[in-house]
Image (cartoon, rainbow, N blue to C red):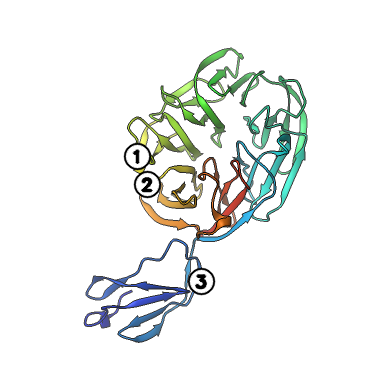
Amino acid sequence: MTSARFIIGGAGATLKVGDSTLSLSRVNDTTLQATIPGTVAGTFAPRLNVGGQETPLAAITIYGYTETTPYAESMPWDIYVLPDAQHAKVMGGYVENGVGKGLAIIDLDSHQVTKVDGALDVNNQRGPGMTAQSGVYVMRAPGVQTTGAALWQLVPSPVNLGAITVPAGTRQLARLGALGWITTTSHTYSVYSGSTGGLLSSGAAEEVEGIQFSPDGTRASFRVNRIDAGVPVFSLPEGTVAYTTAFQSVQSLDFQNDFLLMAGRTAGTPTGSSRIQVIRASTGVVLRDTTIGLPVSAVALNPLVATAYVAAYGSDNLPVVLVMDRILLKVWGVLKVPSTSVNACFLGCEYGQLAISPQHQLYYFWAFNGTPRAYRFELPLP
C-alpha cells in the first residue's frame, strides 16, 4: 500500500482482512506491506488502521484453500489423475473389507463417485495401467488368471474394450506399443520392447508407487522409494532408457509440454527435505534445481501457464502447497490448510496427487491407508 501520509505516519499500522488483523511493515517512505496468512482465501473488504484512524479499502480477492471433502471409498494404493477436458478427476482401485472390488473414479469438481465394479483388483494390480492410447487403461480384474486383464476406455465414460494378456506376477504394469510393457514387483522393474516384446532392461526398485506417461506418449517414469542407480526415464513406445536422473527416490513427477517436474531424494539430500528439478523431458537436461526443507507428496505442472505446484507436509500432518515459477522454481506463495482433525492426514500426507481443474481449482487428493479426502484451493484465472 502506497500513500504520502505514510511519510510521517505508519508506525503501528494494521490491516484487517476478514477475521485477521495484520501488522504492516515499512518498505520505503510511502509504502507499507502486509503478509497474508496462507490459510486466508476469499473476497474481502480490507480496513486500514493508521494512528487509530480506520479507512476502508477496495475489495480484494485472495486465492487459496476453500474446503476439505472426505470420501467413503477405501482406496489404499496407487492414485492417478484421470485427464479430462471438463473436470478434475482422480482414480484408484477400491476395497471393501480388504477385498479388491473395482475402480473408483472421483470427479473432484462435482464430488461424484463412479464405481466400475469388477474392473480392478488392487491386490493383484496396484492401480490402472497407462497405455499409449489416450484415456485407455489396462486393468486386472478380481479373480482372473494372473496373466488375464482387459483394456478399458475411461474417458468420457468407462467402456470395456476386451480382454488382453499381460505379464504375470506384476505389481504395476503399463503397456508400450503393441507388444511391450513396463512391469514392477515389490523389489524390481522390467521393461519389454514395444515392437518385439523382448526384455530391454530391468533392475532393483524398492516399492514402485505408480507408472506415469507424458501426455504426448513419448516419455515414462515412475514414483519409487529407492533405486540406487538413479531413476530412469524411458523413451516410448520402444521402451529404451532415454536418460537416468540423479534421483534415487521419486516422491512425485509430472510431465507437461516437454517439461518433467520431479521431486524426491538424491545422494546427500538432507533428512526431511526434498530435491526438486525441472527437466527438459525430451533430452534430460536439468533446467532448474532446488531443495526445500519439507517432504514432498505430489507435484503438478499447469499446462496453461508457467506455474508449478508442489504439495508437501510437516510434522502436523497437514498439507501445504507451494506455488512456484516453473522457470526459476521461485516460490510465489504458500497455500495452507487450516488445522482441524478432519484436515489431518494419517501418518503423513504421502502418495497423494495434485489435480488441476479447468474450472480454476487445484485439488490435493490423499487416500493412503486412511479416509480419502480432497483439499480444494481456488486459483486465479490464467
What's the amino acid at mark 1? Asp
Q: Name the residue under label 1.
A: 289
* Element assignment for label 1: strand
Q: Is residue 95 left or right of residue 6?
A: right
What's the amino acid at mark 2? Leu
Across and down, in percent, residue 282 comes to 45, 31
Q: Residue 228 lies in what quarter of the image?
A: top left
Query: Which numbered dot is residue 329?
Result: 2
Q: Name the residue under label 3.
A: 43
Q: Nearer the viewer, residue 196 or 346?
A: 346
Residue at 43%, 51% (x, y): give it.
322
Q: Can residue 29 be seen in this view?
A: yes
Q: Is residue 267 left or right of residue 362?
A: left
Across and down, in percent, residue 71 comes to 67, 51
Q: Going from the N terminus, do you reach mark 3 or mark 2 first?
A: 3
Count of numbered circles in the view: 3
